[in-house]
Amino acid sequence: MHSPNSDTIVEIPLNLIIADDEWNSRSGKWEVNDGDDESHQFDGLVASIREKGQEEPCDVRIHPSKAGYYQLLAGFRRNRALRVIAAADKVENPVMRCIVRNADDVQARVRNLSENANRQNISTPDLAWGIYQLHCTASSNGKPMTIAKIAATIGMSDSHVSHLLTIMSKCKPAITAKWRKMPKALSVLSMYSVALLPKADQDAAFTALLLPADAKKAPTTESRKQGSWVDHAKAKAYSIGAIIGQLEAHNLIDTSNLDFSRHIDLIVPIRESCTTVQRELIVAQAEKGYKQGVRREKITRIVGDV
């Protein structure tokens, strides 16, 4: 077992290094080449290490709960590449060049998140998850970190970190889990609007944001088509109304001339077959979402200022 020393690079057997993908803030199966940029980049990394060797060490710490092992903190792609090479080339007793860090749980999270955020183009949902894990770890270890401190640590703006923490802490876990796994993630503003809604309304709002993809699934009967379309339109109107309300509460837009009954067509696509009653129901949802967005955003800001 190597003693922690931030200046010394050592070679550690791969079988003594535990790389927990569930702990890592960056998700994904990099070794699976499905034609995207991620898999091409991983293939390039494998080729580079095979040709030149491991040029940059990975960061580990003595495993906090498994004697004789190390926990990988940063360098998950390099670790995976070395394992792929060792298996393919039948390397006996493969090793990885590492720096053994003297890091507690919070410092370990900071190192992992900083590595991913600054060097590997982490996705926004993964970034949000990593920031939330750092926030929770720091709080549970009696070392709470302010939003400003987290932002400075990973080189992000305070407002961006604040929005991501709000999403992860206020959205239902099932929704943030889906967000993290989506090939093309929804925007921060869209997810933030969902986070400010009551949990009972979040599923419908989240589904409405996915409407363009879901709309391709045609119902089997005309009555189901009409019902499905109106329900989706109402959910979409509520979600967008909430976003408008939040922007108004932040003084980013002026809605004094906005009349939902007149401008609903600009917010939600309205079918020509839409009846007056259906239109009024959709307008009512937009107005309800707007009021909810304004109210919750104002409450959030007041609580945050206390």
Image (tube, rainbow, N blue to C red):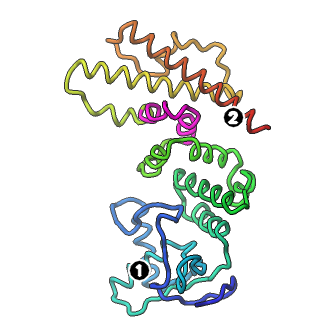
Which residue is at the far top?
A: 276
Q: Position of residue 90 (x, y in %)?
A: 33, 89
Q: Which residue is mark 2?
A: 300
x, y percentage for residue 218? 25, 29
Q: Nearer the viewer, mark 1 or mark 2?
A: 2
Quadrant (top left/top right/bottom left/bottom right) for the C terminus: top right
**Apparent side of residue 209 relative to residue 1 in the rendered image (left or right):** left
Residue 155 magenta: no
**Label placed on residue 218:** none
Quarter-wise, where is residue 135 in the image? Answer: bottom right
Residue under label 1: 83
Along the horizontal axis of the image, is 227 left or right of 99?
A: left
Mark 1: amino acid = Arg
**Left or right position of 135 against 238:** right
Q: Quick one: 296 or 96, which is closer to the camera?
A: 296
Instruction: Point out the stretch of residues depicted in magenta.
Output: 188-207
Q: Residue at x 39, y 32 (%)?
A: 211
User: Magenta segment, principal secondary structure?
Assistant: helix
Residue type pointed to by label 2: Thr
Element assignment for label 1: helix
Q: How far from the left and from the top, in percent, is residue 223? A: 24, 18
Q: Nearer the N terminus, badge 1 or badge 2?
A: 1
**Residue extending furthest right?**
306
